[in-house]
Amino acid sequence: MANNNRLKDCKVTGVPRPCGIDPLAVLNEREQIVANRIALRMHLLSNLPPNLPEETKLQAKIELRALKALNLQRQLRSEVNFSISFIVYPKCRTSTYVI
């Protein structure tokens, strides 16, 4: 009886088993969505109407400069982490850790 139940569980079907979710594809898709949102926000902030109050214009300029500095911050953070990995793990010189 137990052998018969095992055969029922192992039936061969024509439907292929799903491959699952690729974590790198999900990460790349998320990064692309964030990059698109940042680009859209930068476009909106750089094309503001001229009749806004000065305080709003100043806030928009600050936000625009912060968004422009994001890539530099990411690059700097990556370089610092890479340098720290050499200090903490000196035998692992081939490490290519990037955020």
Image (cartoon, grey):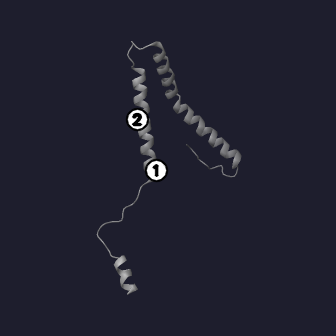
Q: Which residue is denoted by mark 2 in the rendering?
A: 36
Give me the residue at 58% from left, 46% from top.
97
Q: Position of residue 82 (x, y in %)?
A: 63, 43
Q: CA distance from mark 2 to mark 1?
A: 18 Å
Q: Is residue 80 above or below residue 50?
A: below
Residue 38: which disc? none
Give me the residue at 66% from left, 51% from top.
92
Q: Position of residue 46 (x, y in %)?
A: 42, 21
Q: Is residue 41 above or below residue 92?
A: above
Comparing 19 with 92, the one in front is: 19
In this view, the residue farthest toward the bottom is 1
Tell which circle, 2 or 1, labels the residue nearer the N-terminal end.
Answer: 1
Q: Position of residue 4 (x, y in %)?
A: 36, 84
Q: Which residue is denoted by mark 1 in the rendering?
A: 24
Q: Position of residue 48 (x, y in %)?
A: 39, 18
Which image quadrant for residue 72? top right
Q: Of helix, strand and loop, which one carries label 1? A: helix
- The three-letter code of the residue at mark 2 reads Asn
Q: Quadrant of the N terminus?
A: bottom left
Report crowding for label 2: few under 14, some 14 to 19, many 20 or more residues within 10 A (C-alpha).
few
Q: Of helix, strand and loop, which one carries label 2? A: helix
- The three-letter code of the residue at mark 1 reads Leu
Which image quadrant for residue 86? top right
Report crowding for label 1: few under 14, some 14 to 19, many 20 or more residues within 10 A (C-alpha).
few
Give me the residue at 49% from left, 20% from top.
59
Q: Is residue 71 above or below residue 8?
A: above
Give me the residue at 66% from left, 46% from top.
85
Q: Are marks 2 and 1 in contact (CB under 8 Å)?
A: no
Comparing 38 with 3, the one in front is: 3
